[in-house]
Image (spheres, rainbow, N blue to C red):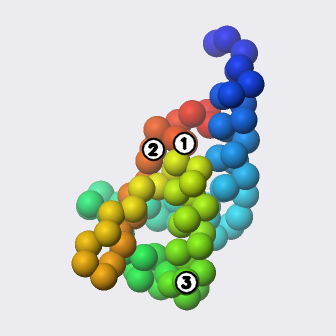
């Protein structure tokens, strides 16, 4: 494979920085295992044992890094992992 260009290296660094937190790694793991059409923030908060506000903050960081996508349904937001963004890290 060819060496990474500067833009690609920066993109990967930003994703690794977003993942450099045990809660975010756990959230991504849960979302990657999901076979449905997303998981509600409320269920993710329960799964990681944090408040919805704190969980939303972590999900926001993962979203900025392109690793998850939100889908608002009524009062709830459902998240899905973006496996391609993780594939780029390999």
- Residue 6's place in the image compared with 13, above or below, is above
- Residue 34's place in the image compared with 16, above or below, is below
Question: Disc 3 or disc 2, which is closer to the eye?
Answer: 3
- Residue sitting at 41 percent across and 82 percent down? 42
- Residue sitting at 60 percent across and 69 percent down? 58
Residue 77, position as x, y percentages in the image: 36, 72
C-alpha span from label 3 to label 2:
24 Å
Q: Quadrant of the C terminus?
A: top right
Q: Nearer the viewer, residue 37 or 59?
A: 59
C-alpha span from label 1 to label 3:
25 Å
- Residue 63's place in the image compared with 87, above or below, is below
Q: Nearer the viewer, residue 57 or 16?
A: 57
Q: Quadrant of the N terminus?
A: top right
* Disc assigned to residue 53: 3
Q: Earlier in the sequence, mark 3 or mark 2?
A: 3
- Residue sitting at 66 percent across and 37 percent down? 11
The residue that label 2 is drawn on is: 83
Q: Earlier in the sequence, mark 1 or mark 3?
A: 3
Asked if disc 3 and disc 2 are in contact, CB closer than 8 Å, the reply is no
Asked if disc 1 and disc 2 are in contact, CB closer than 8 Å, the reply is yes
Question: Disc 1 or disc 3, which is closer to the eye?
Answer: 3
Residue 80, can we see it? Answer: yes
The residue that label 1 is drawn on is: 86
* Disc assigned to residue 6: none
Residue situated furthest top in the rendering: 2
């Amino acid at each position: 494979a060819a060496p990474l260009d500067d833009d690609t290296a920066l993109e990967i660094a930003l994703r690794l920085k977003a993942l450099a937190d045990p809660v975010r790694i756990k959230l991504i793991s849960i979302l990657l295992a999901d076979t449905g059409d997303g998981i509600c923030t409320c269920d993710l908060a329960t799964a990681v044992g944090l408040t919805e506000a704190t969980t939303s903050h972590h999900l926001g960081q993962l979203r900025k890094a392109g690793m998850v996508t939100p889908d608002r349904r009524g009062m709830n937001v459902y998240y899905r992992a973006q496996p391609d963004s993780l594939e780029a890290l390999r």
